[in-house]
Amino acid sequence: MQDAKRPDQFFQRALAEGEILLPKCDDCGGYHFFPRVLCPHCHGSAISWKKASGKGRVHTTTVVRRKPERGGDYNVCVVELDEGVRMMSRVEGIAPGEVAIDMPVTAFVGEAEGVPAVLFKPSEG
């Protein structure tokens, strides 16, 4: 099922099916993101795909300011997942200015600009 030459397409197909999969090196055991054909840790080429835990914490955050008629303000952040990878995304469900560094978040497959994307929401509890 995996196309070793196009890991980005494999990742996007999984998102289209509602799954968040992360590449994991079979040689060193390290997760990495963004998807690529060689492990950035050990340069191994044996890559498997594992379902992401979806749990993470906001590493950095900012608010992009826009006029209301252009959609209003929105959040842009980098989230570090429990697997150790970082993803640029956004936190939804709260005001952009309420997103805080170290805030626990949970990933879900949403939509950004008409395509499936990994988005986050504040974790409950």
Image (cartoon, rainbow, N blue to C red):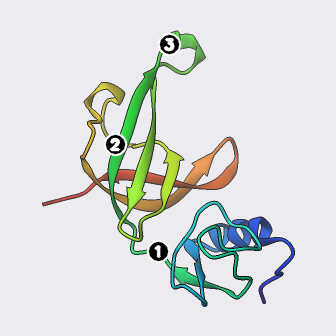
Residue 80 vs residue 42, the one in the foreground: 42
- The CA span between labels 3 and 2 is 18 Å
Residue 59 vs residue 117, the one in the foreground: 59
Residue reaching furthest to the left: 125
Q: Nearer the viewer, mark 2 or mark 1?
A: 1
Q: Residue at x 87, y 75 (%)?
A: 5
Q: Residue at x 42, y 60 (%)?
A: 107
In this figure, which residue is indicated by the disc labeled 2? 93
- The numbered mark, 1 or 3, whose residue comes first in the sequence reads 1
Using the image, determine if residue 6 lies above or below residue 46. above
Instruction: Give how far across and how far down residue 42 sits, in percent.
Output: 62, 76
Q: Indicate the quadrant containing the N terminus: top left, top right, bottom left or bottom right.
A: bottom right
In this figure, which residue is indicated by the disc labeled 1? 52
Instruction: Give how far across and how far down residue 83 sits, in percent.
Output: 41, 71
Q: Residue at x 77, y 73 (%)?
A: 37
Q: Indicate the quadrant containing the C terminus: top left, top right, bottom left or bottom right.
A: bottom left
